[in-house]
Amino acid sequence: MTTGIKRVLTDAAVITAKVEPKARKIHDGGDLYLFVTPTGLKSWRYKYRLTPSFFEEVPVLVLRDIQT
């Protein structure tokens, strides 16, 4: 199954991604990117947006009601 997202980063590129003084994003296509921190932590992140209509459908929950 193909998702239509063109992969740019290879395994070798992820492993050898250099650490820099500032955190940075290395894009892999679409809204997916590799996030590299100054401490050397590498994590995958996906950027997404919620439409205003999405918030209208979510019920409001109060923590006090959930805990009881």
Image (cartoon, grey):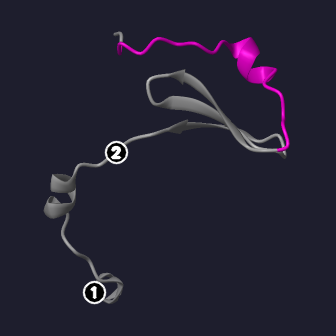
Instruction: Give, as a single range, the part of the protein colored magenta.
Output: 3-21
Residue 55 left/right relative to 20: left
Assign the C terminus to one quadrant of the image. Answer: bottom left
**Position of 22 compared to 51: left or right?**
right
- Answer yes or no: do the residues labelled 1 and 2 have beta carbons within 8 Å? no
The foreground one among 47 and 21 is 21
Amino acid type, mark 2: Arg
x then y, percent, for residue 42:
72, 37
In the image shown, does 17 or 24 lie closer to the viewer?
A: 24
Residue 8 among magenta residues: yes
Which disc is residue 46 wearing? none
Above or below for 24 versus 8: below
Q: Position of residue 3 (x, y in %)?
A: 35, 15
Quarter of the image with the N terminus in it = top left
| Left or right of 44 in this view: 65 | left
For mark 2, give the secondary structure.
loop
Name the main secondary structure of what is drawn in magenta.
loop
The type of residue carrying mark 1 is Asp
In the displayed orientation, state which residue is furthest to the front. Answer: 22
Q: Which mark is residue 49?
A: 2
Give SS at disc 1: helix
What percent of the width, then of the height, locates residue 22? 78, 44
N-terminal of the pair, mark 1 or mark 2, is 2
- Cα separation between marks 1 and 2: 28 Å
Task: Indicate which label's residue lies in the foreground, 1 or 2.
Answer: 2
Q: Residue at x 14, y 60 (%)?
A: 57
Give the number of the disc on residue 65.
1
| CA neighbours of label 2 inside 10 A, class few (<14), some (14 to 19), many (20+) | few
State left or right for residue 46 relative to residue 18.
Answer: left
Report which quarter residue 25 is drawn in: top right
Q: Quadrant of residue 28?
A: top right
